[in-house]
Amino acid sequence: MADAARARVGTRSTQKRADVLEALDACQDFVSAQQLHARMAGAGLQVGLSTVYRTLQALDRDGRLDTVRDADGERLYRWRPTAGHRHYLICRRCGRSQAVDTDVVEQWAERLAETSGFDGVEHTLELSGVCPRCRPPRTSCTA
Ligand SMILES: [Zn+2]
Ligand SMILES: [Zn+2]
């Protein structure tokens, strides 16, 4: 057992990366590095928080993740299953997220790139609100 563990040391960083990706893939929603680290620890995976941070940053650079910021400004990550990027509406209370149709934004951004003469135009879009589950029920009474 110990020998087998030692034999894997050479491929440890790739293995950790695969572990992080797998844990991310198992998450339905956006997670912070700390939440992901806690999940991995709960699953019996021994990986340091700093490794999780570094791996997430590397995956983000490679365009493998969607990222948003929560109400406290903390970065949250989600594995991007498809090549194209998507935008999400995220609940400020519970962190639940849902993909939104942003064709209008994409088309506008493309047009802007064409008309401005700028090359490699990129955009980020952060959308947040309070989801129906967290929103207090509306009453007809006004205080
Ligand atoms: Zn919510
Ligand atoms: Zn976009």
Image: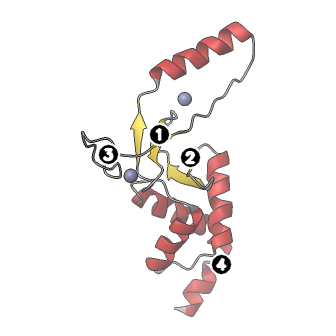
Circle 4 sits on which residue?
A: 9
Q: Secondary structure at mark 4?
A: helix
Q: Using the rendered view, name the quadrant where residue 43 is placed.
A: bottom left
User: Marks 1 and 4: which is nearer the front?
Assistant: 1
Q: Secondary structure at mark 3?
A: loop
Three-letter code for the amino acid on which mark 1 is drawn: Tyr
Quadrant of the snapshot with the C terminus: top left
Q: Is residue 58 left or right of residue 34?
A: right
User: Real-space Cα distance between discs 4 and 3?
Assistant: 47 Å
Circle 1 sits on which residue?
A: 88
Image location of residue 27, percent across then percent down? 42, 59
Residue 66 makes an appearance in the image: yes
Q: Is residue 127 left or right of residue 134?
A: right
The local crowd at label 3, few if under 14, some if 14 to 19, many if 20 or more residues have their Cα within 10 Å, is: few
User: Real-space Cα distance between discs 3 and 1?
Assistant: 15 Å
Q: Residue reaching furthest top? A: 115
User: Real-space Cα distance between discs 4 and 2?
Assistant: 33 Å
| Residue closest to the eye, 22 or 30 | 30
Asked if the residue at tag 3 contacts the one at tag 2, i.e. Cβ–Cβ closer than 8 Å, the answer is no
User: Real-space Cα distance between discs 2 and 3?
Assistant: 20 Å
- Closer to the N terminus: mark 2 or mark 3? 2
Q: Which mark is residue 68?
A: 2
Image location of residue 91, percent across then percent down? 44, 48
Asked if the residue at tag 1 contacts the one at tag 2, i.e. Cβ–Cβ closer than 8 Å, the answer is yes
Q: Secondary structure at mark 2?
A: strand
Circle 3 sits on which residue?
A: 132
- Closer to the N terminus: mark 4 or mark 2? 4
Asked if the residue at tag 3 contacts the one at tag 4, i.e. Cβ–Cβ closer than 8 Å, the answer is no
Q: Look at 60% across and 55% down and name the residue there.
A: 72
| Residue closest to the eye, 32 or 131 | 131
